[in-house]
Amino acid sequence: MLLEFDSASAAPLTGLVSIALMLVVCNLLAPGFVSFNNIMHIAQLAAFLGIVAIGETLVVLSGGIDLSVAWTMTGAGCVFTQVSQGQSSMLLPALAAALASGLCAGLLNGVGVAKFRISPIIMTLGMNNVMQGATLLYTNGTPSGSVAEAGRFFATGYIGPLSVLVLLWSGLAIIVMGVLRASRGGRQLLGVGENPLVSFLSGVRNDRVLIVVYALSGLAAALAGVLYASYSGASFLGMGDQFVLPSIAAVVIGGGSIYGGRGGYGGAIIGAIFLTVLTTLLAIVNVSAGVRDIIYGGVIIAALLLTRLTQGAAS
Amino acid sequence: MMRWLAEARNLEASGSVGIFAFLFAVYIVLKGGHYSLFEAGNLATNVLPLVLVGLAQYFVVLVRGVDLSLGPIMSVSGSLAVVLFPFGVAPAIAAVLAAGLIAGCLNGLLIARFKLSPIVVTLATMSVWDGVALVVLPVPGGEVPAGLQAALTSGSTLLPTSLALLVASGLFGLWVMTTRFGLQLRAIGGDEAAAEASGIIVTELRLRAYGLAGLLAALAGVYFAISTMAGSPIVGDGYILPSIGAVVLGGVPLVGGRGSPIGVVMGALILTIVGSLLYFADLSDFYQSLIDGVILIAAVGSVAVRDWVWKAMGR
Amino acid sequence: MLKVRGIDKRYGATHAVRDVSFDAANGQVLGLIGENGAGKSTVIRMIGGMVAPDAGSIHLDGENLVLRGASDALARGVGSVLQELALIGALTVTENLFLLHAPTRAWLSIDKRHSIRKAAEILARHQLNISPTARVGDLPLGQRQMLEIVRAVEGDPVLLVLDEATSSLGQDEVNWLARLVRRLRAANRIILFISHRWDEIVTFCDRVAIMRNGQLVEVADCAAMSQEQAVALMTGHSEAGGGFPRKGGARNGVLLEARDLEGSMLSRVSFTLAPGEILGLGGLVGQGQTELLRALFGVPPLRGGSIALKGQALRLRRPRDAIAAGIGYVPLERKSEGLFLDKSVAFNMTYACLALGVLSVWHGLIRFGRERAIVSDAIAHLKIRTRSGRTPVRALSGGNQQKVLLEKWLLTGPAVLLLDDVTRGVDIATKHQIYDLIRALAQTGVGIIFYSSDTNELVGLADRVLVMADGEIRKVLADGEVSAAAIVGIAFRPRADS
């Protein structure tokens, strides 16, 4: 594999070290915290963020951003529970419907960005609102339904000591990393993100790459929504809001450039785990919601500064 | 004065004036054909926070930036104001405005000096300010001195105060753009490299733009709290997208360098009037966010459509 | 008095400026000449404060000049007019002239009427026929260049740096600049005048400093040096235009046929290209040569006319169509249009052929072993100086970057290769390697159409030359008719019907 060790690899290393440090602090505050079960649990929580971050990684690599993941995720979760209504026979149709809603949102984002040249911020921010309205209308303000046991297995079940959700995430991660590193599409994505003009003059269909990438992001957010609803047993309005900032932060903290063309999913995985451990630590420390938000935002800013300063030093 | 009005002779801004005039006419017709100064005052009260946040976003957009944290800054300022009012109105407002200025300068520091991406930074500071608002005022409430609300909304003179404040906001925006500061902001947005090479200290100006934005957002929050007689730690969340919407509808391009503050005022008015028209169409509240999103996307997308048409006509 | 001592600058593997020292006295115009890539622009940027030297010092009137940007430079009395113009196109002439210190009223508003009046005075004083309220972006390039020079002069600099300041000026405008420079000389200012044309240096300068490969090779009085001597010092060769590979090799038949092409800037362009032929596009800069090459690549799609390759009609709506048909295009600006600067040599080389299956892509997956082999072969074959295939292209010198770019297109196996000023900014040794490469490619039957701003190169390399003017083909110079005189003569001839 043509791996290139550069300043972008420094960030994930720092991330790993910080994760370890935070786990040490967790253990100090709540002795016995660091156990296999707890780590698996943290990995489960990180999986939702990690799956949303798949889409965000792809979109950011293309030079854009997806701010519509919040309500795409919520919407898909609501569709899933409402269509399946707790019956295992309806699980597959419900899954199909939920994923389709995410795919549609993503496709619209992609077409808007690629064909209509709408700035990704505007397009996805607007789509977020559209999905919000659509979800509110669909559920009439109150999400209904639940997830049958068979469905919940994928989010809460275990095969031996390993969580099914974590296995699922791992599988997806391997596929995504493989595609990015070793496929023609992955290379083209990196090219489009770094310099769309060069990519266009090299014969790549930029538009197609963009549309695919946004569609995948919508799909990933929808999948995360389905799994999250399965995990909780029901869907609730606004359940996706907590994933917007972290999914983007995970990509950037993991060493990806927000301007596109550089980075990979491996870094985003570390970023997702880092942020999940941070949330867990803050929960253990038992501060109020407001203080938690402040610290969370503050840590992300610190991480951004650190990434910037190490990049600056290396170049 | 005439010179200032001449500044407003900006083609896209004129378009937004036209659109607002049309929608306003429709609104009056639907209402039965009469419209009093009192009602105009009410409209002004409703729209003033959005006008101020829109102007805040405008100054940031002029230098090719975007600030998603303006909403939360609004929340913080409103919450802080109602908590501090018991200690005196003037000191409370002064403190709150100072806080907004500092918040804006923090964004500016991270973005201009440390060259971090505006989206990621303001997403992170969004979390910080949301947290601060929750800490300051965990639940909506607080006290607003009784006379204050009346004074700043309807007033006791012939002209409702809010209407006067609305006009003053527009004039303020125009005035800023006639100063050296405004000219240099346009220069940076127009061609940053050339501006730098011409001797403009881009970093400092950009920081000041974000600082001004924070100040205006704080002003918006204070006014909102006063006019609704209460503070709320989450009120700003609903202003983020509309602040960008007002800018875009006002004909200001997101790449910066161009656009008139009057356009932004019109954009805010258009968004607010559409909300009122929805009421007449008997559509539930659920449609509000959906419509906001569609308007935003359509407004920006229409530029692409217009360019296609021009290209097809051979321009 | 300007004293430059031992300034040095590296960009990655490129040693752009090596230990350069020279003096320039007040009331003197010092010329700086050298080929593209010789280091002139970097020296200027260091003096002007845009770039910090890695070593050495710069003293102006006894003071050590440590500048951190344009604003610093202006404050210290150093004014620069660089190739990338520092005017803001969206603003008016007046606004650009008074970006920093516009006259204001009591309440901080800019006094527009006063500004416009003052701007008009400045323009009149410098005999510039430009409206103060015109939008700078609407002005022709020549006027923009003059405006920027005026702005720099109005800043009353002690030292004025002019980098290729005549690049967009017509003869009258060049005379205007000469008068301006003479006035500045009389006012005891120091002027640094950069150019790559000897006749300009002689017109404007008292003394000249010659650079080659980042080093200062000679400083002398202009009067004491001849053009041949200067060119020899610039290129390091005793002969200016030698060393082209032998011509001939065009085969029979028609590889590419273009008929009545109409497009952006192009009208009624018709020509044929034989297999193995090297067809040159000549004429003054900006007469449609780049537009023609790009039109043959689908950028933007032609409005009218037809193109046939090997007898097959082509509809070229985008580069992808052209590449699929077997046409490759090496763009003008390699850094912004040709290469991904932060990606590796390997990534860049293989990017265009990803979709063609040339890289033995199996169901979309890349065969890394094959890629490694192809890339190392290319590096050896083209003698690309790089640490490995994984080095980011940004770290390579201009000539080596160009080789990477060429290989990228060679890998697509084109039938026709379009080259847009492919040796611009490339050092002499690499230029000759590229000439050999082009000739060798032609011998395999590939048809080549190339544009060069260097007439000698056209004459040396092309089998036939299409001389263009105003988007049309003025004349086709066949084998044997091709000479510098012929090309220049036709290019300057007025239109028959005007």
Image (cartoon, rainbow, N blue to C red):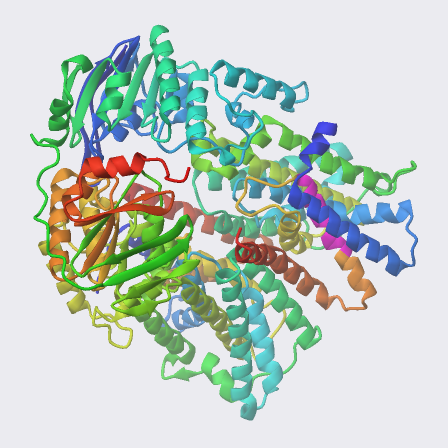
Q: Residue furthest front?
A: C497
**Residue B18 percent location from the top left of the image:** 74, 49
**Residue C475 percent location from the top left of the image:** 28, 45
Q: Which residues are magenta?
A: B261-273
User: Quadrant location of residue A192?
Assistant: bottom left
B270 over C4 or under it: above or below: below
Of residues B288 and A165, the one nearer the viewer is: B288
B150 over C210 or under it: above or below: below
**Residue C245 percent location from the top left of the image:** 8, 47
B245 left or right, relative to A222: right
C458 left or right, relative to B181: left
What secondary structure predominates along the stretch shown in magenta? helix
Q: Residue furthest bottom?
A: A89
Q: What residue sits 33% from the left and 73% below the top? A: A175
Question: Is B269 part of what is drawn in magenta?
Answer: yes
**Residue C195 percent location from the top left of the image:** 27, 26
Q: Where is the N terminus of chain A found, in terms of image quarters? A: bottom left
C80 over C84 or under it: above or below: above
Residue B44 visible, this orientation: yes
Q: What residue sits 55% from the left and 35% below the top? A: B186
Question: Is B195 part of what is drawn in magenta?
Answer: no
Residue A19 visible, this orientation: no
Q: What residue sits 56% from the left and 40% below the top? A: B62
Q: Where is the C terminus of chain A found, in terms of image quarters? A: top left
How many marks the image carries: the answer is 0
C339 left or right, relative to B46: left
C275 over B24 or under it: above or below: below
Of residues C310 and C498, the one nearer the viewer is: C498
